[in-house]
Amino acid sequence: MQRQTFLRLCTLGLGSAFLPNLSYTKHRSSGKKVIIVGAGMAGASAARTLSDVGFEVQVLEARNRVGGRIHTFKDWGVNLELGANWIHSASHPDNYIDTLATQAKVATQETNYGKFKLYDSQGRKIGRLRTQLSMIKFEKQLAREAELLAASDSDISFLELATRSYTSSGNKQEVINRLIRGSYANNFSDDLSEVSAKYYTLEYEDYSDRTDYLVTGGYDTIVKSLLSGINVEFQSEVKEIRITGNEVVTITDNETYQSDHIILTVPLSILQQGKILFNPTLPDYKQQAFSRISMGLFNKVFMEFEENFWPGNTDFLVFQHETLAHFGIAVNYHHYRKRPILIAMPVAESARWIETEPDHVIQQTWLNILSKAFPRKNVNLKRVKVTRWGQDVYSLGSYSYVPVGSQAKDFEAIACPVGRIHFAGEATLSAHHATVHGAYLTGIREANRIMGY
Ligand SMILES: Cc1cc2nc3c(=O)[nH]c(=O)nc-3n(C[C@H](O)[C@H](O)[C@H](O)COP(=O)(O)OP(=O)(O)OC[C@H]3O[C@@H](n4cnc5c(N)ncnc54)[C@H](O)[C@@H]3O)c2cc1C
């Protein structure tokens, strides 16, 4: 089947249900069984939705915990989020995560992106007013350049668009140029040279809403509360899925399961790398769809110090590094939880560097940066924790982004079901991909689809 024909069929099948219809409680199931692969946010929302209307639900999770790319680390006596930390676009009408956080009594705090301190690679502070004026000029020019891009048939990289916008906005300071690139790369989780300018300036719906809440009360509590009372089988890595007639057979190392439907919520990289065997194999268009969206890399370095020596009243500290681009955006966790903790968020090239270096090298690089910026302070590190999401065999990366030349409809192709095999997860929804609320919506979308089967 041609890809375009398939896309049309898929969209017809979905109708207006591409975004979830939350009135699902009207439906009653006839005791059908659904296997859900993955106990992250998408799996949890699908399981909750189907279970609430009487489906027999079985969640199979490869790890020994729920949450997937939501992972709350508690060993330091404070909640540290190794994966997702923010509820992005919290005021967006399709975003229910804030409501779920309130229901689960999980504390959150609004982030102010305008409150940051910027240091150049020599540790010199750059004035905020000047930085913000430059950013405003840049953003205005970016909007103009995006309009020009809309008229063109071809796509370019976000780096090219940003460079054009930066140059024609009259900005001259390299330090600001690097800040802009760093902060955008952080959104996309890869080098801007890989990222589609057309998609992110013209197609991506979430672009303008930046009301974000930092979850400080434990993000995983939200997933746990969705999964409460639901049967989750841990350490159950799904290896193979077989379709025989109207039955789905799901195979792990220890067990074989039969069901009427299956919802796969595994990260896109798991599908791209063929970690699950499909019998019969998935159609070609599906394989092509997997490869048209990319998986980026974003890691975190948590550093606790003996005492807090940096400016307190700021949400972020941004340190530039001579060679590693996008290295030094750090959350001032002291501002949120009164603990002397900085959370660095390296992406793309810097995140890849993190994956290859031992903790002590990463730690020393950070101590050098901080000693330059605060030469008269005692920079005494107590402990460090580093994530390596690229090496995590059940994530193989952090979250999806749209590479140059790909489009919103590529997400629809990934989401399109193949018979009784359904696809959910953050990389299956254009409008809110790469987010927790996007993953949540996809779980409900696929549950609704099964109800209408
Ligand atoms: C470092 C980092 C920071 C982020 N920050 C934010 C943020 O601040 N805000 C935000 O909104 N989003 C953020 N994200 C993205 C967000 O975490 C994800 O979009 C979302 O959690 C994905 O949910 P999911 O259910 O689609 O996938 P996952 O959470 O990955 O769930 C999939 C599950 O499938 C399991 N699995 C994999 N393979 C198998 C198999 N073969 N058999 C059985 N189970 C399997 C996995 O173990 C996992 O539990 C961040 C992600 C990362 C990595």
Image: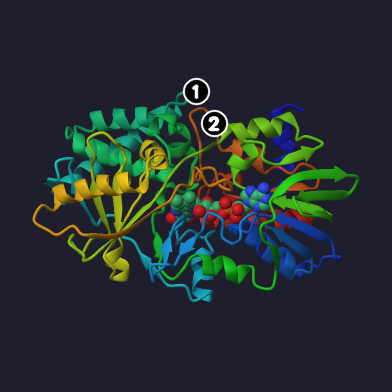
Position above or below: 359 against 170 = below
Q: Quadrant of residue 223?
A: bottom right
| Residue 161, percent from left and from top | 36, 30
Pick the front one: 382 or 95: 382
Of tags 1 and 2, which is closer to the observer? 2
Position above or below: 116 against 4 = below
| Residue 419, percent from left and from top | 81, 44
Please rate how many residues cluster around mark 2, counting C-alpha atoms within 10 Å: few if below 14, some from 14 to 19, many from 20.
many
Pick the front one: 216 or 286: 216
Residue ID at (76%, 39%): 278
Residue ID at (55%, 47%): 395
Residue receiving disc 1: 153
Q: In the orientation shown, which residue stands out farthest toward the left? A: 376
Is residue 278 something that shows in the picture?
yes
User: In the picture, which quadrant includes the N terminus?
Assistant: top right
Is residue 265 something that shows in the picture?
no
Question: Is tag 1's residue or tag 2's residue first in the polypeptide sequence?
Answer: 1
Q: Quadrant of residue 184?
A: top left
Position above or below: 147 against 240 = above
Please report contact status of discs 1 and 2: CB closer than 8 Å, yes or no.
Answer: no
- Residue at mark 1 to residue at mark 2: CA–CA distance: 13 Å
* Labelled disc at residue 406: 2
Please name the amino acid that badge 2 sits on. Ser
Please name the amino acid that badge 1 sits on. Asp
| Residue 389, percent from left and from top | 48, 47
| Residue 415, percent from left and from top | 66, 44
Q: Quadrant of residue 22?
A: bottom right
Pick the front one: 361 or 354: 361
